[in-house]
Image: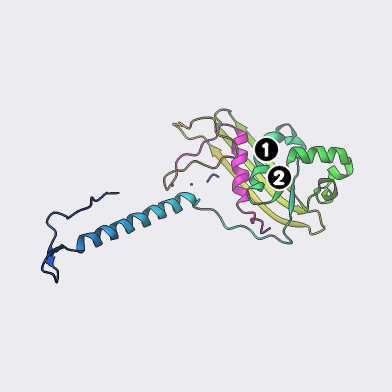
Amino acid sequence: MGAVAGGRRVGAGEVAGAPRRRGRSGQAVQAELPSRSVSASSCALALAAALLLALGACRFGDPAPTPLRGPEPAVVAIWPRVAKEFAPARATLLAGLDGAVRARGYRVVTSPVAAEMLAAAGAAADADPAAAGLALGADAVLVCAVRSFAAAGDRPLQQAEWDLTWRLVSTRGMGELWSWNDRGTWLRPRDDDRPPGAPLDALPEVANVGGGPVTYRGADELCAALHRSAMLRLPKTLR
């Protein structure tokens, strides 16, 4: 559920104890071996620094995306509805989903905007994601289907369980383009010393290889992390 991020200066002049050789003019000249050694060390240090920068930019463990079963949509609308029994927690359950889809490169109609557009279009458009393309101005709708969700505690979250399915539904008559299911539980580890204040859609902090305990301030932050994890399986747009 979560996801990882993660010299010595040599002075100029003759090196003490360095071997010396005679030039053709008969004058002593400094051996080239030490300077070559320094040059090789500098190259090694530069290469190591470049590798560290590259590793810092990588996110280890990203899963391979699941291919789309149809044409790639240019615009994706986030379906602003959840099952009736979860409606009071709708904002929590959809927290961070807009940003997670946008991070894959798609143009996104956010869930609040989609809710307004559906309300203006009437009940017919609000009933079926696949038929809402005209009302939402989108090629596909991303639906987060909540089969179960329960959480205890807040600031910090103590425990949670969930069963969520994300479905990308075409509004152009192509059916379901992509889906992913995540079912799991989480229990807050002991000795949680995470500082508060990071935004919900912030990437995880850089950690040592192997990571550390994963904690959440609330159910909204957990849902945002679940959305980010699920959207890693959604192929990035090629547009």
* Residue type beneath disc 1: Leu
Q: Nearer the viewer, residue 62 or 157?
A: 62
Is the residue 122 above or below the residue 40 in the image?
above
Mark linked to residue 144: 2
Numbered disc 2: secondary structure = strand
Mark linked to residue 93: 1
Residue 236 percent across, percent down from the top left = 64, 55
Specify the segment rendered in magenta.
212-239
Is the residue 37 above or below the residue 76 in the image?
below
Q: Nearer the viewer, residue 130 or 47?
A: 47
Residue 53 lies left or right of residue 173; in this view the side is: left
Mark 2 Cα within 10 Å, few/some/many (few <14, many 20+)? many
Residue 25 percent across, percent down from the top left = 13, 69
* Residue type beneath disc 2: Cys
Which residue extends farthest front? Answer: 25
Q: Quadrant of the C terminus?
A: bottom right
Q: Are marks 1 and 2 in contact (CB under 8 Å)?
A: yes
- Confirm whether the magenta stretch covers residue 63: no
CA distance separating discs 1 and 2? 9 Å
